[in-house]
Image (spheres, helix red, strand yellow):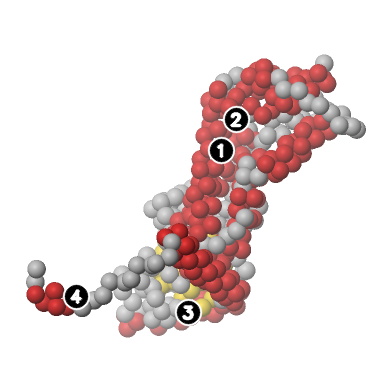
Amino acid sequence: MDADFVDLFGSVKKPKRETGSSSSYHANIKDEQQQQSMKTKDEIFKKFPSFKQFDFVNDASDHHFIHKKCPLNQHPNNWSDAIQEDWEILEKDLPDSIFVRAYKSKMNLLRAVIIGPKGTPYQHGLFFFDFYFPSNYPIVPPVVYFHSRGVCPHLSLFASGQVYLSLLVTKDSIGSDLWRPHVSTILQVLVSIQGQILTEPIIKPPAAKSTSQICNKDVFTKSLSIMEQMIRRPPKNFEDFIVGHFINRAHDILEAYNAYMEEGKVECLVKGNGAMHFESYLQRMVRMAATDQAVLEYYNTSLAERMKALVKEFTRIGVEDCEKFLYGGNMKRKQKNMGIWLRRILHHLNEELKEVTTIYCDNSSSIKLSKNPIMHGRYKHIDVRFHYLRDLTN
């Protein structure tokens, strides 16, 4: 062994081993880690409301266009004037759901995050976009990159990061929504992305309602994937904002997940104007193609797996009581949902429960309803209700 190495480290004393029990030693470390985690969480949560919608930052090291040069002496005078004008508009008129960071040392770069609008599959998600202003801006529109993290949540938002928006097009195109030099602004681009892309997918007739539900579940699943990635690898200058945002909205996201998992369970049995004979529902379900049922099962399974992964990230950043909000995580919640579900069906059948009613299990009804193993496995709990309903409608 090298003598210098021995001399250098020979005098270093090994830490004394803890004399107490091993379990208490590790428990103390765990308590310290939890206290530190809670302290960090509280600090972030206190700073979260004061996070400015528009501000200037210095670190652009993870910006997608960081390697684009910005020699000010090679740009026309109106280039910097146009960008500064955009800054002023953004600082004054940004909606509550959009946050922007600009770089004074790199005027050609800008970063924005859009919060997914409520009532859409993108709700509560964080969608980041990097902007690059070329030397002939504002004659041409900015170049925009979407932080997809390998996910394509919309036909206009590619997994490669490319963004398709009419406002980002000028050459050889016709339309009123195209980029207009010295008129169009970055604020218009951001609002257009939020209003035209991050909205509920449009399913035109004669597409079935189930098609719309599947599409929305798919988009919501992809949004959850992006949320998970943003928590794991937050873009620079938004680290505390991302943690504060998801601590604040985690339970809302879980409630939205519950709604998507419940979606369609009542409609598949109660459909049309007024009360319908129960057997017609049973016959309709029997006629359903096995492939359609398998598709629904696939999207529900994918959604559940993605939510499970996101809950781990929520817990890691300090979100509490996730299991109480998670579908199937609380037996009382399941019983409550079951009661509401049954009550709605009885209401549509013009029946009222005026006293305590015993419901008997008849597994054959569940088998007839499912007609294949996938549907049977998912809806086996329905058999408890069908025995009573079948007798009620005969």
Q: Amino acid at mark 2?
A: Arg
User: Marks 4 and 2, how far apart in space?
Assistant: 63 Å
| Numbered disc 4: secondary structure | helix
Q: Which mark is residue 9?
A: 4
Q: Is residue 189 visible?
A: no
Label 4: few (<14), some or many (≥20) within 10 Å? few
Disc 2 versus disc 1: nearer the observer: 2
Q: Are marks 2 and 1 in contact (CB under 8 Å)?
A: yes
Q: Can you give x and y, in whole percent of width and height, for residue 363 in the image? A: 67, 20
Q: Which residue is mark 1?
A: 300
User: Marks 3 and 1, how far apart in space?
Assistant: 42 Å
Q: Residue at x 45, y 56 (%)?
A: 229
Q: Amino acid at mark 3?
A: Phe
Say if 391 sits above or below 103 in the image. Answer: above
Q: Which residue is mark 3?
A: 56
Q: Amino acid at mark 1?
A: Asn
Q: Amino acid at mark 4?
A: Phe
Q: Residue at x 9, y 75 (%)?
A: 3
